[in-house]
Amino acid sequence: MKVDFMYVMAAGEIDQLLPAIEEAKAAGIMVMGVPPQKLAPFDAIMHTSQLEDGQKVARMACDFIEAKYPDAADGSVETAIIGGASSSVGMHLRDEGYSTITDICPKVKLVAHADISTDSIPAGQAAAENVLTANPNAKVFLGQSSAHAQGIANAIKALPGVDLSEYGVFAGDMDPSMIPTVTSCADPYKGFVAIGGTALDQATYDQMKKMLQGVEHPNIINDVLEPINCDFSTIVPK
């Protein structure tokens, strides 16, 4: 078919695709992979440090706690992680990053650490409803994905007489349509990490162009991890 270049983005496991990738390379086709953990057998990869991603989410959540609850005692702000600790596609590393919140944020009291495999808004909402039923004072949530975070926010907004400013929901990736919601500070969903920053499409295009033109290019591109959140200084302490 006269293909010169293939861009392979695997949302889940990539191992089952490796024989086809090796076949493509044998036919002289350049292959770039997203987001495998190692270069071989690709010509280039765009790589995300999921551990660092999770650590940045934990940092955001801690910054929110310090801004909203400056006088809270250590171990008093009930916090929940809704992640993918058992995932085999890198989300377990993101979950490990989330877990650092108990190391960096003394005020945190981790009351739940859910492990769910389904990535959807309803899955995030159901998990948050379970957490809130058992821990009605939980105020901070770290969700595996933007979809989970939206579901968690929905569960919070359904609570009777809720003060949305008291809650902070944070995620390890970005749904661009949620930027106005997150930055408004008016929703429980108050922060996420943009993988590749807000110009990932341009960075991807630039890399592909270099490869196709045969000019010098990196084989491994580490994605920029850009935290995007509301201005916590505008949140009135409780």
Image (cartoon, helix red, strand yellow):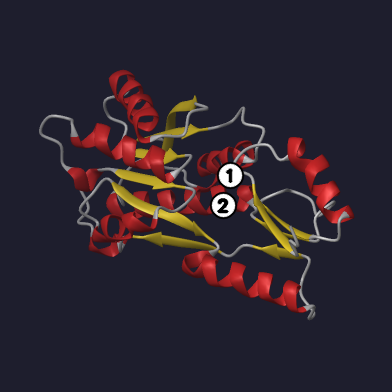
Residue marked by disc 1: 97
Residue 190 rendering spot, x and y as whole percentages: 32, 52
**Residue 29 placement, left or right of 221:** right
Q: Residue furthest left?
A: 161
Tell me, yes or no, if residue 74 can be seen here.
no
Residue 122 rendering spot, x and y as whole percentages: 34, 30
Q: Identify the residue at horizontal 32%, vertical 54% (top origin).
A: 178
**Residue 117 placement, left or right of 148:** right
Q: CA distance from mark 1 to mark 2?
A: 7 Å
Q: Image height check: is 230 above or below 117?
A: below
Q: Image height check: is 172 above or below 110?
A: below
Q: Residue furthest front?
A: 1
Q: Image height check: is 125 above or below 68?
A: above
Residue marked by disc 2: 53
The three-letter code of the residue at mark 2 reads: Asp
Q: Identify the residue at horizontal 23%, vertical 63% (top origin).
A: 234
Which of the image's four quarters has the N terminus?
A: bottom right
- Tell me, yes or no, whether the two marked residues, 1 and 2, touch with CB atoms within 8 Å: yes
- Of residues 11 and 113, the one nearer the viewer is 11
- Of residues 117 and 204, the one nearer the viewer is 204
Tell me, yes or no, if residue 175 can be seen here.
yes
The three-letter code of the residue at mark 1 reads: Gly
